[in-house]
Image (cartoon, rainbow, N blue to C red):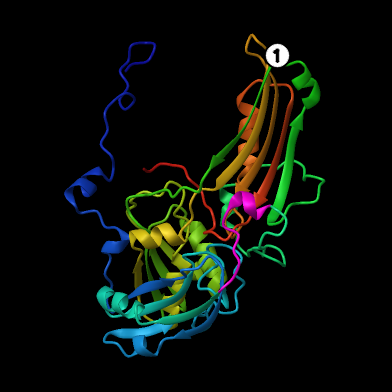
Amino acid sequence: MSNKNGKEFKYLGKPRRLVEGAEKVSGHAKYAADLTLPGMVYARPILSPYAHAEILSVDKSEAEGMPGVIAVLTAEDLPTRDKLIASRNSAILAKGKVHWRGQPVAVVVANSEAEAADAVDMVFIDYEPLPAAVDLAASITEGSPLVWPNGLPKPEVDLSAAHSGVDKGEGAEVKLPPNVFDSAIHARGDIEAGFAAADVIVEHRYETPMVHQTYMEPHASVAEPDPMGGGITIYASTQGQYGVRDEVAGLLGLKSSKVRVVPMMFGGGFGAKYGIIDPLVASVAMAVGKPVKMVLSRSEDFATTTPANGMIIDLKTGATNDGKLTAIKATFYVDNGVFAFSIGGIAAVLLGGYYKCDNVHIEVYEVNTNKAGAGAYRAPGAP
């Protein structure tokens, strides 16, 4: 490739090796799961089998007596015990209730991964199942179980803001359906006049489920406390090391300068690796005073991380016979899961901005359900 004067470019148009390519194909690349530190112990989460339930009791006694087991921890045993659970990142361990199937309830810490995995089966948790809102359409109908009867808690650090920083338009001036925590309207022109001018009107409901990002490398994290300096170092598979730092610092009551995050080689994320297990691993490490490693299994990763939002979209479109759009009217119901990950504003801007159309009216309703909190699904810079 050359410029207009015929001079050959040095880099443009030339094949280049990936910076990390040789390390990866030769097997020398080090991921968080490959890391071993002196004195390191291993953690395994115990996940809720219910979408909504009261935790009546946790019997740790048999597990605590098993070979190699160092501790069986619940929310009350962690330095984050008094923190509000208001986001997926701050949902360290369930307190009193579980709000989605796959929510971490306890953690087993042992000298080896095998010993930790064996002890998980010997922790006996008694639940009282409660009505749950698990279907998006049903959750916004009268009489549906309420995910947050007293309103959605507001997180101290909102990592979702990095993904959903878009003007949400104006709030809808209507009574909101059950489990809807936010709404917005994006509009321009005269929607009724637009449909009156249409030769053809197409109206349909579209539904998309929550979808897991399915990266090759499951979530993995290693946290090493610093007993002398009072800080902590986290070796993380993450797309947002500064977000992890701020989340962990806030949860542990540390200055951000006391939290060091080392991004490890990365096995894919698609927007989903933003401090999901790092706060939990850091809290466990501070509780036991040792370096702690946690690597989720594939089934654990599916159950407890942050899939893309599901949606119901009611779309009505008007057009002339020669193909000119005259009106776009839509209502989005966005499944955020148990916490807030408000991407409806982005969806509305995209729908209203892709096509030339003078008359647009889009309503967005952000909905909570008893499912894992949603997260981003994209690919910035890595597969």
**Which of the pair 298/375 is nearer the observer?**
298
Instruction: Judge whether residue 4 can be spotted in this image.
Output: yes
Q: Which contiguous range is marked in magenta?
A: 129-140
* Rendered location of residue 2, percent (x, y): 33, 16
Residue 7 forms part of the magenta stretch:
no
Instruction: Judge whether residue 254 can be spotted in this image.
Output: no
Residue 138 forms part of the magenta stretch:
yes
Q: Residue 229's image quarter?
A: bottom left
- Image point (44%, 65%), residue name: 278
Name, please, the residue furthest toward the right: 173
In the drawing, does residue 15 fall left or right of residue 178?
left
Q: Amino acid at mark 1?
A: Asp
* Rendered location of residue 42, percent (x, y): 32, 75
Look at the image and tell me in which quarter the N terminus lies. top left
* Rendered location of residue 276, percent (x, y): 47, 61
Tell me: residue 233, above or below residue 79: above
- Image point (73%, 56%), residue name: 142
Look at the image and tell me in which quarter the C terminus lies. top left
In the drawing, does residue 101 fall left or right of residue 226?
right
Tell me: residue 121, above or below residue 10: below
Name, please, the residue furthest toward the top: 322
- Image point (64%, 45%), residue name: 333
Tell me: residue 110, above or below residue 25: below
Residue that badge 1 annotates: 199
Is the residue marked by circle 1 packed among few (<14), some (14-19), or many (20+) residues within 10 Å? some
- SS at badge 1: loop
* Rendered location of residue 186, percent (x, y): 73, 36
**Count of labels shown?**
1
Name, please, the residue furthest toward the left: 26
Name, please, the residue furthest toward the front: 143
